[in-house]
Image (spheres, rainbow, N blue to C red):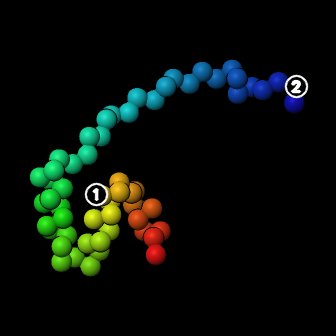
Amino acid sequence: MPRNVAKLVKVSTPKYKVNRGLTVPQARAVLTAAYDEPLGALYVLALCLGLRRGELLGLR
């Protein structure tokens, strides 16, 4: 190919909304609600480590 036609495309920078996460009282409420749940440990890891759903479900 003599030239890269993808250089002709101009893409604008995506604008994302800022996710601020949970406040401390909200996080405590989630942990309290998840205490007796079978997957409660996943909620603890998600809140403490900030792991995403796919990362949490990939843990052994």
Q: Which mark is residue 2?
A: 2
| Structural crowding at the residue carrying mark 2, measured as other residues with C-alpha within 10 Å and reported as few (<14), some (14–19) or many (≥20) | few
Label 1 is placed on what type of residue?
Leu
Secondary structure, mark 2, is loop
**On screen, 57 above or below 27?**
below
Q: Which mark is residue 7?
A: none
Q: Earlier in the sequence, mark 2 or mark 1?
A: 2
Residue at 45% over, 70% down? 59
Q: According to the image, label 1 marks what residue?
A: 47
Label 2 is placed on what type of residue?
Pro
**Horizontal side of residue 5 vs 1, given as left or right:** left
Secondary structure, mark 1, is helix
**On screen, 12 above or below 29?**
above
Q: CA distance from mark 2 to mark 1?
A: 51 Å
Question: How far across and how far down the image is residue 9, in percent?
Answer: 64, 23
Q: Nearer the viewer, residue 3 or 28?
A: 28
**Horizontal side of residue 53 vs 12, given as left or right:** left
